[in-house]
Image (tube, grey):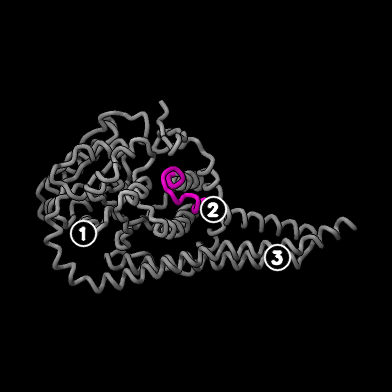
Amino acid sequence: MILLATIVSALSQPALILSLLLVVAIVPQVILTAWFIQMMRLWVQQHRAQSARVQTQTLAVETVPAEVVLCLRGCDSTLQQVFASLARQTQGNWRLRIIVDSQTDPAWNAAHAAVAAMAIPQSSFLPPSWREVLIESLAQRPTTGSLKCASLRQALQSLAPQTVVIALIDADCVVHDDWLETLVKECLQPGVGAVSGNRWYDPEHDSVAGTVRAIWNAAAIVQMTAFGIPWGGSLAVRREAIEACSWVDLIQTTLCEDTALAAPLATSGWKYHFIPSLIAIDTTDDIALVPLTRWISRQLLTARLHHPLWPLVAIHGISTSFSLLSVVVFCLIAATFSHWSAFGVVAGSLVAYEVVSLLLVWAIERSTAQVVALAGKQIRSPTVGRRLRWALALPFTQAVYATAIVSAMTTRSVEWRGVTYRIRQSASSFIVGIDP
C-alpha cells in the first residue's frame, strides 16, 4: 500500500510536465500554420491585383524557349492524363523530353503510343502544343545516384542551345493548361533561379490510408514552404542557375533531384520561390498503410540526405512523437493506479492538442482550396462525415509519422520503384549507391 501511495503521489508532477510538453510541441505548429495561411492570403491578393499586367506579358512569355523533362520507370495509371494535360499547354515554344528507364519498360510503349495518338489530327482536339517530342531510354545505368537523377542528368546534358527554362514533371502530376507558362514566367523573375508547386491529396474514397496521407501532406506543405524545399513533380529551373550551382554534377550521387537543389541554389546566389497556384490535386486512394509509411519515410529521407534544414525537421518530428508517446504511456500508468486527477490533466491536454492539430489541418485545407480555385481547380467541400473521418485518422497519422521519422533517421537503404539504394556518408555529404 505504501508503494502504491508513493507511485500515485509521484504521478502529479509528471502530469504537469507532460501537459507543458504538449503546449511546447503545438506552439511552433500554430505559428508556422498561421504564417502559411497569411502567405497564401497575400499571394491571392497579389495574384488578383496583377492579373491584368500578367495578361499583357503573355505573348513575351510564350516565346521563351523551354524544355519539359519527364522521367519514366513503370507505367503510372495517370500517365495518359499527364500526356493529355501537357498537350494542352498554352506555352508556345517548348519541347518535350521523355527519358524512359529502358526500352523494355512498359512506359516505353505507353509513351510512344500516347505521343503518336496525339499527333493524329482530330476534329475535336487541337494539335499538341509542343513543337517537338524526344523519347529516349536511359543510356547508362549508374552506380551512384538514383535512376531518376541519371535520367535527368542525361536530359540536362543534351539541352537545345536556345533553351532558357527547364521544367520537370512527375508521371502522376496532371497539370492545368497554363502550368508551363506560369513556371516560365515565375522562373524568369529577377534573381529567381527555380520555382515549384506542391501536391495536395484529396482521396476520392476517403480510405484510412488515403486520409492519413492527406493529413500528413497538409502539414508537409507548410514545412516545405517554410524551409524552402522544392517539389520535383512540378519544378522549373533557369538554365543559367543550373550551370551556376553545378546541379548536373551534384545529382550524380543523390537520391532525388529537388531537395538537393535548395542548398546549392542559395549558395550560388539564386532564389527559390513556391508558387501556390501550381499545387497539383491528387485524388488517388489506392494505397495501404504499410507502403504509405515507407513512402513518407522516403520523403523524409530525402530531406535528411540533401537539405540543410533537416535538423529542424528531425527535431520537430522526434519531439512531437516523443511527447505524444509519453502522454499515452502516462495515461495508461495513471489509469492502472487509479490516479484519476493526473489522468484527467494529461488526457485533457492530449484532447486539446488533437483538437488544435485538427483545426490547423482544416485551416490549411481551406487556405489551399482558395488558392487552387484561382487556377480553376477544386478541392471537395468538407462534409460532417469527412470531418469525422479526418478526426479519427489523426492519431493514425501521428503514429505513421513517428514510425517514418525514426526510419528516415536510421535507415541505410531504401527501396524505390523496385530498386534498392544504399546510403553511405562521405566527409561532407551522403552518397547514394545502387545495389547490383
Type of the residue with mark 3: Leu
Give SS at disc 1: helix
Q: State whether the magenta stretch is mostly helix, strand or loop.
A: helix
Residue holding disc 1: 185
In the rendered structure, find residue 315 and report the number of the disc placed on it. Answer: 2
Q: Are marks 2 and 3 in contact (CB under 8 Å)?
A: no
- Magenta residues span 302-316
Q: Residues within 10 Å of mark 2 (few under 14, many from 20)?
A: few
Give SS at disc 2: helix
Residue 28: horizontal and vertical position, in percent? 52, 63
User: For the residues marked 2 and 3, what is the alpha-carbon distance in whole angstroms?
Assistant: 22 Å
Q: Residues within 10 Å of mark 1 (few under 14, many from 20)?
A: some
Which residue sits at x=18%, y=70%? 53
Q: Nearer the viewer, mark 2 or mark 3?
A: 2
The quarter of the picture where the N terminus appears is: bottom right
Q: Is residue 177 visible?
A: no
Is residue 117 depicted above or below 283 in this figure?
above
Which residue sits at x=30%, y=37%? 249
Type of the residue with mark 2: Ile
Residue lying at the far top in this picture: please name it: 436
Residue holding disc 3: 16
Give yes or no for residue 313 being in the magenta stretch.
yes
